[in-house]
Image: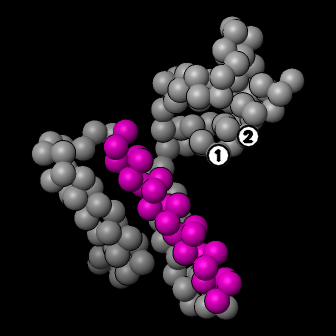
Amino acid sequence: MKSRETARVMTIRGLLTEITRLEKDVRREANDAEIVQIVKRERARREEAIEFARKGNRTDLVEQNEAEAKVLSSYMPAELPREELSAAIDEIVAGGTTQMGAVMKALRDRFGARLDGKLASELVRQAIAR
């Protein structure tokens, strides 16, 4: 706040509001996994807003949402490298699991918040098709 980074302050305030809302709904403190999910959801909302702003030729909104997305990205855990994810998928499929849902569940259990669901589902489809 002292450095007058208004985009960062507003983004963090919005994030804290979402966390507080969750805590009121479940009547307990949010755990780390829930907070990461909230950050990911807010990041996805910004990405969607960027797409709509680009379609509407609103460069001011594109810049604002990109700045907010960058702030949110700084609070997300490090993404899982594609090679490590591919190796884990190959290992699970080689173990006899050929159902998409079962493989995705095993990946979520193993990697948690580090897992990029979109990339994982794409790689799982390719591995099962082989």
Q: Can residue 26 be seen in this view?
A: yes
Q: Which SS class for mark 1?
A: helix
Of residues 88 and 72, the one nearer the viewer is: 88
Looking at the image, is 83 positioned above or below residue 96? below
Colour scheme employed for the rendering of this structure: one colour
Q: Could you say where residue 14 lies in the image, as x and y percent from the top left? A: 32, 69
Residue type (three-letter) at the residue carrying disc 1: Lys
* Image mark for residue 122: 2
What secondary structure characterizes most of the magenta part? helix
| Residue sitting at the far top | 95
In the visual, does 119 lie left or right of 34? right
Q: Which SS class for mark 2?
A: helix
Which contiguous range is marked in magenta?
33-56
Question: Which residue is label 1 attached to?
Answer: 118
| Residue sitting at the far right | 130
Is 20 one of the magenta-colored residues? no
How many neighbours does mark 2 have within 10 angstroms: few (below 14), some (14-19), or many (20 or more)? few
What residue lies at 29% left-to-right and 61% top-to-bottom?
Answer: 18
Circles 2 and 1 in contact, beta carbons < 8 Å: yes
Q: Could you say where residue 7 lies in the image, as x and y percent from the top left? A: 42, 78
Q: Could you say where residue 61 lies in the image, as x and y percent from the top left? A: 54, 85
